[in-house]
Image (cartoon, grey):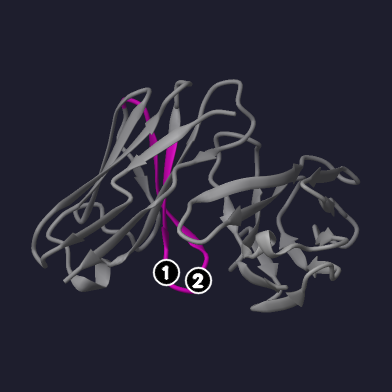
Amino acid sequence: GDSVTQMEGPVTLSEEAFLTINCTYTATGYPSLFWYVQYPGEGLQLLLKATKADDKGSNKGFEATYRKETTSFHLEKGSVQVSDSAVYFCALARNSGNTPLVFGKGTRLSVIA
Amino acid sequence: GAVVSQHPSRVICKSGTSVKIECRSLDFQATTMFWYRQFPKKSLMLMATSNEGSKATYEQGVEKDKFLINHASLTLSTLTVTSAHPEDSSFYICSAAGEGLNIQYFGAGTRLSVL
């Protein structure tokens, strides 16, 4: 079945450091790929998404590119801030809307000043 | 973007009682709602999928008599944890999808603590 594997955390970075959180997936066909963020005490918020190969999703300085050849969707940010501290989930869906999401285990990011 | 309201955000109950969690789509019609459960330091696991007006489809290993799901209208789905026990303590989160929407929108989640 479909699955998502993302790097284990926790990840601790200093402010303004470069961030990469690796995510790879297993699925047949061309799923849609997502990154969700969960801030402390809150629910999930969509951070960015990509629906086809070579698409780049971007939001709030975060970027991820849908790589079909490596089945990856790594999350990157050039300069993290303390406010980026959260848990980040990589996820896929077979179709964009009415199908359930398959999530990775989440990566906790802590950014220190 | 679309808004999904989940209530309550936190509930503490005694073992053996039942707890109802509501998930509402505030500005769109949710033809499909999903219920997930998040264990500590683990990912979200799909519990069930509910379509308006029909019975929910439960994932393998999820007790349908334990976790009752009702999706009686296009804006409301409820999850009732019946006869809750400490092992049911978890973070429950719903999401909703509607016609013409290409992503799901999540509620803020409910943290259930069973004493």
Which residue is painted at 54% across and 28% down in the image? B2
**Residue span colored magenta:** B33-53
**Could you tell whether A23 is left or right of A17 in the image?**
left
**Quadrant in which residue B14 is drawn:** bottom left
Tell me if residue A51 can be seen: yes
Q: In which quarter of the image is the N terminus of chain B?
A: top right
Q: Is mark 2 on a helix, strand or loop?
A: loop
Is residue B45 located in the magenta-colored stretch of the structure? yes
The residue most toward the front is A113
Q: What element carries label 1?
A: loop
User: Which one is nearer the viewer's eye here, B41 or B60?
Assistant: B41
Give amino acid for label 1.
Phe
The residues bearing labels 2 and 1 have C-alpha atoms spaced at a distance of 5 Å
Few, some or many C-alpha atoms within 10 Å of disc 2 (few <14, some 14-19, many ≥20)?
few
Is residue B115 located in the magenta-colored stretch of the structure? no
Chain of the residue under the numbered disc 2 shown in the image: B
Mark drawn on residue B42:
2
Label pair 2/1, CB-CB below 8 angstroms? yes
Which residue is painted at 39% across and 59% down in the image? B60
**Could you tell whether B104 is left or right of B9 in the image?**
right
Percent x, y of residue A112 = 70, 74
B64 is higher (above) or lower (below) than A55:
below
Chain of the residue under the numbered disc 1 shown in the image: B
